Amino acid sequence: MLSARDVAGFVRKNVLPRRALFLAAAAFTLFFAWPTCADQHASSATTVLDLSLEGEVNPILATYIDEGLADAASRQAALVVITMDTPGGLSDSMKDIIQHILNAPMPVVVYVSPTGSRGASAGFFILLSADIAAMAPGTHTGAASPLIGIGAYPVAIDETLRRKITNDATAFLRSFADKRGRNPQLAETAVTEARAFTEKEALDGKMIDLIATSEEDLLHKLDGREITRFDGTKIKLALVNHVRAQFQLSGRQRFLARIVAPDIFFLLLIVGVLGLYTEFTHPGMIVPGVLGGISLLLALYAMQLLPVNIAGILLILLAIAMFILEAKFTSHGVLAVGGIISMLLGAVFLIRSPLTSGGVSLGIALAVTLPFAAITVFLMRLVLRSRQWKSSTGREELLGAQGVVVSPLAATAEGLIRIHGELWRAVSPTNVPEGREVRVVKVEGLKLHVEPV
């Protein structure tokens, strides 16, 4: 029979070491398993990628949206939110954005925000193409009538052509608005009648899906919502445990977005031409040539991205020719006025974007054309006037110069005259007394032929 001391010794030798070993093993397992649990928790979080579409719709912004959607696909994001505030832009860029939204592997939300923003013209088309169309309070959308003109200033066109462009725009809108379950009939009035809608009018008209006060409110309202994709598949959004990620414009894209804006492109084109013209007419100034060359190269780069119309370029070149001719010929301003009209028309036709405008604004066109005309005519007149100036050095300088007779001049004998503080031998066909003023009519070597003044 074991005593109490024997039992206590057995416990100390066998049970306690095993318990300590068990606790150490548990701690070791927990230590190495904890990061794995954390990783599994992080991987279970839903990624929501945020994009921003601000300013005029142009090729650089279209590339940015395309790259953002591709980045969302690589992250396996559950949702993409495009926050939009745009007055419209180029039709080709708009169609490129819509095509990528329709083909995106994940749901895309277009959200007109913050308060005071708009999704006008091209932005209206983009808004209705999204899986979820949302607007913030105090925003508006619509006004998507086709325009051909300078910015928001339409130019009269043939009625048949207008109907053709309008019908093309409405058919394009119906092609995705109807499949998104929106109201195509009301949406068409934004194109045919240039109607605009507040967020409440758009929601009541079944053109958008919801109104949200903020992005967090938007995601809260979308959590658990079942949506139908463009291909007909249904997806239920689970956004309770979501992680927000931002996809920003790169520095290069921000710089290029400025260049491809129609107003900036037109300004670079004119500054480039004017700078090179100034350098050619006044060699050695250097600065105008450098600035003109850089501006023209940037304009040529933008020309590769923008839908430039060759007719606009030719009209601008014709305007430059008219300004030069105005300086050479007396046209009483007819050539100058013709050049101004030609350059304004060139600005009208410079950018081809009949569906949603996006051309050069009237203010920029006038602000650039009028100073350009004045500077071009002024520089050319300086060049022409410089060709009539006498040479200020050499023999030619003495022709027509006046001097004073120092030694009398006889009809058959040489005398001395003082010109510009110098003494010259001179002859005259008549007698000229000392102190009389004479004018140089011919230079023959070191001898001057003069006549009395």
Image: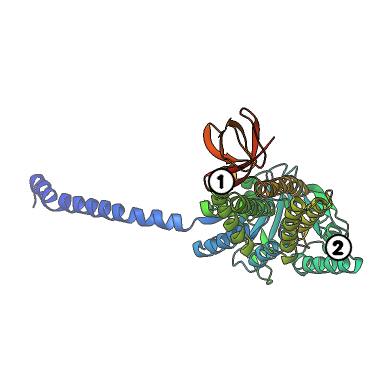
Residue 294 lies, in percent from the top left, at 55, 53
Please say whether residue 143 is visible from this viewpoint.
no
Is 114 rendered above or below residue 402? below
The reply, left or right, for residue 187 in relation to residue 19 is: right
Residue 322 lies, in percent from the top left, at 76, 56
Name the residue located 53 percent from the left edge and 48 percent from the top edge.
Answer: 445
What is the tally of numbered marks visible in this picture? Answer: 2
Extreme-top residue of the structure:
435
Q: Quadrant of residue 184?
A: bottom right
For label 2, the SS is helix
The amino acid pointed to by label 1 is: Arg
Is 374 rendered above or below residue 237? above
Circle 1 Cα neighbour tier, 10 Å, few/some/many (<14 / 14–19 / ≥20): few
The residue carrying mark 2 is 185
The residue carrying mark 1 is 395
Residue 229 lies, in percent from the top left, at 67, 67
The amino acid pointed to by label 2 is: Gln
Colouring method of the image: rainbow
